[in-house]
Image (cartoon, grey):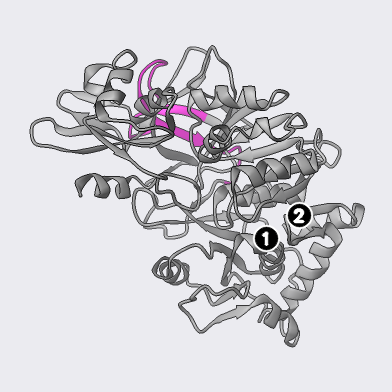
Amino acid sequence: MPDLLKSRAATDPDHTALIVAGQGSLTLAEWDERSTAAARALPGPLKGDRVALVFGAREWLDYAVSWMAVLKAGGVAVPLSDRLAAPELAYMIEDCGATAVVHGGGDTALPTERAVPLTELLSGPAAGEVTAGPDPLSLAQILYTSGTTGRPKGVAATHANLTSPPVHPKRRPFAHSRHLVHAFPIGTNAGQVMLLHALTAAPAVVTLPLFTPARFAALIEEYAAGTVFVVPAMAAELLNARVQDRHDLSSVLLLGSAAAALPPPVAAGLTAAFPNATVANYYTSTEAAPAQTIMIYDPDRPGSLGRAAGGSRLKIANANGTPVAPGETGEVWLRAAAHPRAYYDTDQDSAFQDGWVRMGDLGRLDDEGYLYLVDRESDVIKSGAFKVSTIQVESALHEHPAVADASVFGVPHPVMGMAVAAAVVAGAPLTLSDVRAFLSARLAGHELPTVLLTLDALPRNAAGKVIKRELRRMAEE
């Protein structure tokens, strides 16, 4: 990674790599110079030591400098968001064995005396050194999973993994854009992908510290962004706020959605709100990256997540990894073209097998190799003799004109074992009977919710994924 920055900074020093709305910007030359200074301020050489980086969304510039500094000093960067609760931070810092914690100087309660603000670090003596070309197969970062189904796991990536697939200097990604806009938080896989785009892609990467539909749309308009990335929850908020009525979004040529499957009604709404944009759904995971599938929204395949891209491989298989026939439901497996990731704690390797990653989703492939998700394996609701796909019910709920956001989950039932429950954010009053009547023309009887929660907002983690265990707790109460 340091070699990539050094090379690009030498050929294009004044190119703006990062812009943080309201906070400033960073050119490639500044990124290289500041990260070298920070690397020399770290106690080193680090020789594979883990350094936790705790920064907030307003501190993307200092975070980018710190992340590269750790790599230049021969260490392993551990990106963490300051939005995490103190016990979560403490667990991750302890779990990865961090020898130091660098932070942005905010008011986050850091559970260690080893924490030092970046500004204080840079004002001290240059005690460390910059390593000469780290081994490409050495670890570069440990990124923690979202923990929606259990305790977060640390996923280790090498320099070779992060630089794969290679980018040709004359064919940089998103060359149709001068600016790429996103609002992903630090410490997420989507956020790290945007950081890598700042290093390798053609446009300047612009981020918004705090997402609101109006601010995000205004930022797109201000920079005439050609590329925009969101998560499905952000996409739904943009549509519900009808930002296209107040902002010029015609500059957007590519609108990418990541982190979760994009509900078909939301994808269709995006194509109308962004009149010149190709809407693409990217499917991967912290464990599988850079392997992914990409689907350009197609009304004839509204629920598909596309086919493997960028040299990735995709299969639907049983628990042993043996492929099943097209049309049959099985586990979704992805494989990167080279240099796969692994859990940092090797005792937690159940997701990995011979370079393949079990995605934790159930799905099927059609005859042309297009992927369709059935559900998260842990989310499937087994109700009596039936298995209910929460994805299918959620998609139907998003068709309701009053539903702004929706999530479906299982709750205990004394006879059926589990029953279907739904949580919705509604723009108008909704009752369970209203929802069941609307869905009855779209779903089978066993798929209709028997419990309805109406909320002001769905509980989500930093990556934008719904925390369903919190919904189950609310339903039980």
> Judging from the image, what secondary structure is the residue with disc 2 in?
strand
Q: Are marks 2 and 1 in contact (CB under 8 Å)?
A: yes
Residue pointed to by mark 2:
18
Q: Is residue 35 left or right of residue 216?
A: right
Residue 227 locus on image (x, y percent): 72, 36
When asked about the image quadrant of residue 74, the answer is bottom right
Residue 163 locus on image (x, y percent): 69, 48
At a point 39% along the width and 15% down the height, the residue shown is 327
Does residue 322 appear in the picture of this structure? Answer: no
Query: Residue lying furthest front in this view?
Result: 429
Residue 340 locus on image (x, y percent): 55, 46
At a point 51% along the width and 31% down the height, the residue shown is 262
Q: Is residue 98 left or right of residue 350?
A: right
Q: Is residue 442 left or right of residue 176?
A: left
At a point 39% along the width and 22% down the height, the residue shown is 396
Q: Which of the image's four quarters has the N terminus?
A: bottom right
Residue type at mark 1: give it.
Trp
Residue pointed to by mark 1:
60
Magenta stretch bounds: 314-339
Does residue 307 appear in the picture of this structure? Answer: yes
- Taking depth in this image into account, of 250 and 345 the one nearest to the observer is 250
Earlier residue among tags 2 and 1:
2
* In the image, residue 334 lies in the stretch drawn in magenta: yes
> Judging from the image, what secondary structure is the residue with disc 1 in?
helix
Residue 137 locus on image (x, y percent): 63, 56
Query: Residue lying furthest bottom in this view?
Result: 125
* In the image, residue 446 lies in the stretch drawn in magenta: no
Q: Is residue 434 above or below residue 349?
A: above
